[in-house]
Image (tube, coloured by chain):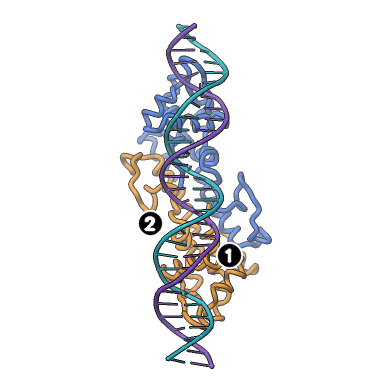
Chain colours: A orange, B blue, C purple, D cyan
Amino acid sequence: MLSKKTKYAFHALSYLAENQDKGAVLIQEIASSKNISHKFLENILLELKKAGILGSKKGKGGGYYLIKKPEEITLAKIIRLLNGPIAWLPCVSLNYYERCSDCADEATCNMHIIMCQVRDQTLAVVENKTLSDLIAKTTDKQALKY
Amino acid sequence: MLSKKTKYAFHALSYLAENQDKGAVLIQEIASSKNISHKFLENILLELKKAGILGSKKGKGGGYYLIKKPEEITLAKIIRLLNGPIAWLPCVSLNYYERCSDCADEATCNMHIIMCQVRDQTLAVVENKTLSDLIAKTTDKQALKY
DNA sequence: ATAAAACCTACAAACTAAGTAGGGTAATGC
DNA sequence: GCATTACCCTACTTAGTTTGTAGGTTTTAT
């Protein structure tokens, strides 16, 4: 299951994407608009900034804004950042790989092979969906169909 | 990520499937063979029994045994039982559905639609793989390929 | 009867997620 | 230049889940 942190990140990013013309947006504005604790959201936005997805401006008139275009921000990237590994086992994770003690040989471990399939099927969706798909309007909905 | 409980369950079930001819197998035998704490495994096997996957015999000469054929036990069933929902959001879960406050209308919520796709892609794998795929030998490996 | 084994309940420890607190620091506008 | 604004950072608390432990109860074969 996706953590609240991850869901909050999607909400915040959607809000920023929908308000790109506004320039910098206050944390408080996002927080109250999406019903998220101000301080908790602060941490999330900071992580997104460190990951190079958001930019920020300090001082009066400051706030956060998207650095990249919505269509360049994949769901996979956000999920990995806030939620952690996408794979079901460390030994099949592309970004958080850890050797597992169970499979002596990954090439012949049946569990390993099957979990790779699960991972690839999942990635086929989330690597190809972006923030722009999240904020797409109903009329564009056909594009979402897989 | 799959929990240890889930992984232990797969190990135990594999052991039972590979030793079906033995009849009832002791918890202790599975535990020491797969390096699992006896008492922890006890809980897991009990859950599998209550779910109708395992049978048991009490007293001397007792133990656990498979009730169903390995090819009838899908990975999806085990994962749902020990690990919980397969879906990434409660509102797209088939077995653990909960309405989510975010999407006013599930039919037009983009997140909802995308997460359904993820779920379906995952299920396409784990609903069609069974315990018999887990214990398949190297020569049968082609059958595993997706 | 007795030993062996599953069954059951409750608890403890460790870890993670979620949220809070409070101040530090940099930029901005007047 | 100075107060204000608002991001930045560290640490802590709370709650929940996962993992594992302890000890007793029931059933069965011999």
Q: Nearer the viewer, residue B29 or C4?
A: C4
Q: Nearer the viewer, residue B46 or A139?
A: B46
Q: Residues within 10 Å of mark 2 (few under 14, many from 20)?
A: few
Q: Nearer the viewer, residue B35 or B74?
A: B35
Residue type at mark 1 is Ile
Q: Position of residue A14 (x, y in %)?
A: 56, 69
- Considering only vertical position in the picture, is A57 above or below B133? below
Q: Nearer the viewer, residue A19 or B94?
A: A19
Marks 2 and 1 sit apart, C-alpha to C-alpha, by 29 Å
Q: Which residue is mark 1?
A: A36
Q: Which residue is mark 2?
A: A95
Residue at (34, 49) in percent of width and height: A98
Q: Position of residue B4 (x, y in %)?
A: 44, 40
Q: Position of residue D2 (x, y in %)?
A: 46, 88
Q: Secondary structure at mark 2?
A: loop
Q: Circle 2 marks a residue in which chain?
A: A
Residue at (53, 51) in percent of width and height: A1
Between discs 2 and 1, the one toward the N terminus: 1
State left or right for residue A120 relative to residue A139: left
Residue type at mark 2 is Asn
